[in-house]
Amino acid sequence: MTKIENSRPEPRRSFLATAGGAALSLPWLESFVSRATAKDGRKQPASPAQRLAFFYLPNGIVRRGFFPGEGDRPLPSFANQNNVWRFEGKPTPVGTHPLTFTPTLAPLHRMRNRISLITGMDRTFQHGTDSHAQAASCFLTSVAPFEVKNSAYPLARTLDHIAAESIGQTTPYSTLELSCNDHKNNIESIYFDNMSWYGTGHVAPSMRHPRQVYDRLFGTRANTRFRNITDLALGNARQLQKRLSTSDQRKFDEYFESIRTIETRMDRIDSMKAELAAAKIERPAEIMPRNEYIHLMGDLLVTALQSGLTNVGTLMVGPERWTTPTNWEGILDKPHSHHAMTHNPQQHLEDLLKLDNFHVSAFARLLERMDGIEEANGTTLLDNTIFTLGAGMGDGTTHQYNDLPLVVAGGGGGKLKLGNHIHCQPGTPLANLWLTQLQTLGIERESYADSTGTLPEILA
C-alpha cells in the first residue's frame, strides 16, 4: 500500500456525499477502507468482497468444437429430449488433466492459469416440459428433480439468490440479472429467458436493455442537468484527491473512465437508433449490433461487481429456443435463429462454431478486464470472483442433460485451484459444483439439490 503522510481513512459515505448526490458507488480504494486491528496491534487492511457470477450459453454448444477429444465426433441428428448421450469415441479418463484448447476454447488461452474446464457433470431432466424450458430456468436450482410437488419444473430458489443471502446483504443490489434477449415478440414463457428465481414460480426478471441497466445502476437519466455522471462526480470529488494514494488515484481514474466509455457507447447507440428511425429504415428487433450488445451487457456486469453495487450477477447471452431470427452483426453475415441452427448442424456447422467461439471470446474478454482491476492485498477483481461459463444442455442437437459444458474462472479469494481440465465420474451431479462454490464463499451447507459431494479437485 502507498503511504500518505497524515492521511486517515475516509468513509465511503462521506466521499459519496461530495460527489454531487449522484447515485454512484466506488471501486475498492484503500484510502477509504477502515483497517481492523490485529492481535499484535498492527492495522490490517480489510479483505475485499467475494463475488459470484454466471455467463450462460443458451441452446447448448457444438461439442466437437468445445470438448477436447471430440474433434472427429460425428455430427448428431436431431433428438428431442434424448437426455443421456455418451460420446462413442475414446472417452476422457476420469481425473485431472492438462488443459487442451479446442477451437471454441482457444480465446481462453491467455487466461489458462485462471480457468478450469469441468466435464462429465450431469443434470436430471424431469419429464413434463420442453427440454429448453428446464435448461436455463433450472440450471442454478436448489432442488432435486421431482421434489417440488405439483410442478413440472424442478425449480426452487436459485444459487445466485442463496449466495446473495450471505455475500449480497451490504450492496445496493443483492443480485443483478441480465439477458441479451432483445426480441420484442415474447413468444416463449418466462422459463426460456430467466435463470434467476426467488423461489418456485417466482422469477427474478432479467433486464434486457443496456440503457435500463445503466440508469438503474447509476441513475443519470433521472436528471438531464446531470447527464454525464463522470463530469459530475469527478468535478465535485477533486477536493478529496489529496487524500487518495497514488495507486488509488489511478484506480479512481480508471473506474470513471470505464463508466464514461460505457456512457459514450450508449449515446452512440441511441444516436444510431434515432438516425434509423428518421430514415424510416426497417430493422428487426435488435437494438444494436449483436457483438456490441453482448460486450456492453458484460461490461455493465463487471462494472457493477467492481463498484460494489452488487456481489452476485447473472448474464444470459441469449434466450432459450426463441425461433425468431437474430441479426448477428459482427459475427454472422445474415440473420439466423440459433435454436433452429442447432437442429440442423450438418447445414449450419460453420456458423454454429463461429457463435460458440464468439461467446467464449466474450467471456474471455471479461476475465481479462477483471484481472486488470486491482483490489486489496495485491489481488484483482478476478481473484475475488467465482465466474462460471456454462449451458443447461450438453448439446443443442441431442438436447442432452449430461456432460454439460462448464468453465470455472477466478480465484474465489484464493480458495480455488484452477488451470486444469477436470473430468468427473459419469453421473456426477452439477449440484456438486454449486455446493463447492457455496462452501468456497464461506457459506456453510452440507448439500445442495441432488448433490453427492463437492469437487475437491478445484479447491486450493
Image (cartoon, rainbow, N blue to C red):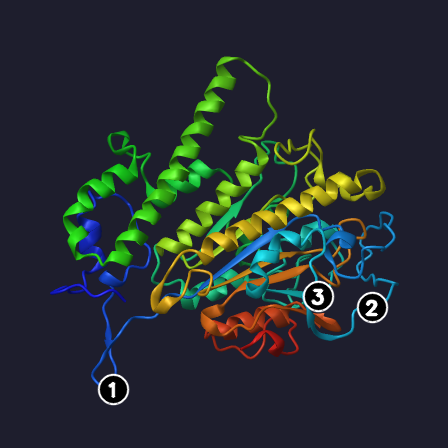
Closer to the chain start, of discs 3 and 2, is 2
Q: Position of residue 403 (x, y in %)?
A: 74, 63
Q: Secondary structure at mark 1?
A: loop
Which residue is identified by label 3? Answer: 119
Which residue is identified by label 2? Answer: 91
* Amino acid on which the number 1 mark rests in the picture: Lys
State the residue in front, 180 or 42: 42
223 to 431, vertically: above or below: above
* Amino acid on which the number 2 mark rests in the picture: Pro
Distance CA(mark 2)–CA(mark 1): 54 Å
Q: Is residue 64 visible?
A: yes
State the residue in front, 220 or 406: 406
Q: Secondary structure at mark 3?
A: strand
State the residue in front, 392 or 335: 335
Numbered label attached to residue 39: 1
Residue 49: image quadrant is bottom left
* Amino acid on which the number 3 mark rests in the picture: Thr
Q: Are marks 3 and 2 in contact (CB under 8 Å)?
A: no
Residue 353: image quadrant is top right
Number of callouts: 3
Closer to the chain start, of discs 1 and 3, is 1
Q: Position of residue 439 (x, y in %)?
A: 51, 75
Q: Are marks 2 and 1 in contact (CB under 8 Å)?
A: no
Q: Position of residue 405 (x, y in %)?
A: 69, 59
* Residue lying furthest left: 6
Q: Position of residue 162 (x, y in %)?
A: 49, 65
Distance CA(mark 1)–CA(mark 3): 45 Å
Residue at horizontal 85%, vertical 42%?
Answer: 346
